[in-house]
Amino acid sequence: ITIQDMCALLHDLGLPYHFWAEAAAMSFYTHNLIPSRRHPDKIPAEHWFNCHQDVSHLHTFGSTCWVKIPIAHGLQVTSGSKLDDQSVKATFLGYAMGGHY
């Protein structure tokens, strides 16, 4: 099922196949946050971690997002004006390791 989900994500958004790893990771991640027929009262992640899982952070794969421009070694990447862009437009491809979204 996950390979079908991955292919559906890529095909639906018209993304190239080199994003297969991101699509697969997103498919696995969301699959583990959905109840199953075997355990309709709990999602798999709740069984593993033995606590309620918050799903309010979920976003749609391939949706538009804004990424903050980082400050490298204390220096802003832009010219330094407060009126410069603070973020860039991007495509949401998944979640960072360690729970930073």
Image: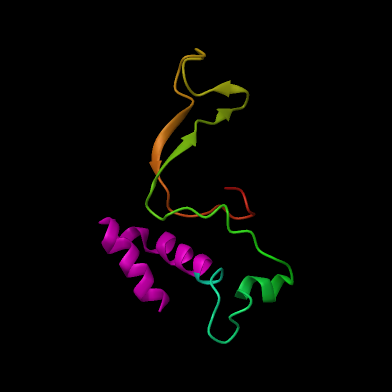
Name the residue rendered at 50%, 66% in the picture.
30
Q: Is residue 54 magenta?
A: no
Q: Is residue 50 left or right of residue 68?
A: right
Quick one: 72 or 99, which is closer to the camera?
A: 99
Quick one: 11 or 46, which is closer to the camera?
A: 46
Q: Position of residue 66 (x, y in %)?
A: 45, 37
Question: What residue span does the magenta drawing correspond to?
Answer: 1-30
Q: Is residue 22 magenta?
A: yes
Task: Choose top left, top right, bottom left or bottom right for residue 10.
Answer: bottom left
Overall secondary structure of the magenta section: helix
Q: Position of residue 93 (x, y in %)?
A: 43, 53
Question: For the N terminus, which image quadrant?
Answer: bottom left
Quick one: 59 or 90, which is closer to the camera?
A: 59
Q: Position of residue 48 (x, y in %)?
A: 69, 74
Name the residue rendered at 54%, 31% in the picture.
70
Q: Is residue 25 left or right of residue 51?
A: left
Q: Is residue 74 above or below residue 50?
A: above
Q: Position of residue 69 (x, y in %)?
A: 50, 30
Task: Choose top left, top right, bottom left or bottom right for residue 40.
Answer: bottom right
Name the residue rendered at 50%, 24% in the picture.
77
